[in-house]
Image (tube, rainbow, N blue to C red):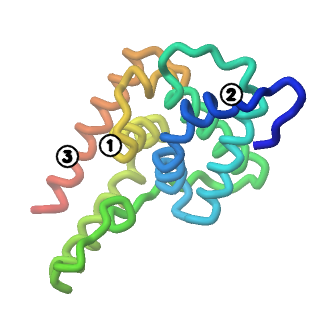
Amino acid sequence: MNGNENTSPQDEQRWTALFFPYRESVCRYLYTKTRDRDLAEDLTQETYAKAWTNREKYQEEGRPQAYLFRIAERCFLDFYRKRKASLNLEETFESMNSRTQTESPAQVAEGAEEARKLRETLDCLSPPQRRILTLRYFSQLKFAEIADILDMPLNTVLSHARRGLLELRVRLGEAEK
């Protein structure tokens, strides 16, 4: 963070204390969307740079995490719009739920197969459903926070989540048969 003549050391410390605890969850969220650790780190850095640059606009309402995720979502979308790349929201469970050293090769293989099935199934969902379920289950956010991040009405978020979960259950149920 670059201090300027308008920012006191106390302001920097307050900002850091308010936003820094969410850095890992923001990075994890961006990784779920990009599946590229370096890119997720870059986008996380960009998120924090934008949050710092616009710190005067932030109104403290007890939702710094939602504020950061909204910026992260915009950074992600801007990145892909600029490069005209297709959105790829796949995520592997291996990276999100670190495997312990005690797992057998068979358990690791089974987990990888489950992750593959989930990735394929997530690809069948609409983009809003994927985004909402990713935020909810990979970033552990509440639906109200997701609504803030995506700038959607809460009922819309809830209905997308419900339809997405129903679709996942049907498709994953079919895969087990």
Q: Which mark is residue 170?
A: 3
Q: Quadrant of the C terminus?
A: bottom left
- In the image, residue 41 lies at what x, y percent? 61, 57
Q: Quadrant of residue 166?
A: top left
User: Mark 1: few, some, or many residues within 10 Å (few <14, many ≥20)?
Assistant: few
User: Mark 3: few, some, or many residues within 10 Å (few <14, many ≥20)?
Assistant: few
Q: Is residue 71 above or below residue 76?
A: above
Q: Which comes sooner in the sequence, label 3 or label 2? A: 2
Q: Is residue 151 left or right of residue 147?
A: right
Q: Is residue 175 above or below residue 54?
A: below
Label 3 to label 1: alpha-carbon separation: 18 Å
The three-letter amino acid code for the residue at tag 3 is: Val
- In the image, residue 84 lies at what x, y percent? 74, 52
Q: Which residue is mark 2?
A: 10
The three-letter amino acid code for the residue at tag 2 is: Gln
Viewer-nearest of discs 3 and 1: 1
Q: Which mark is residue 91?
A: none
The three-letter amino acid code for the residue at tag 1 is: Tyr
Q: Which residue is mark 1?
A: 137
- The residue drawn where x is 53% and y is 46% is 23
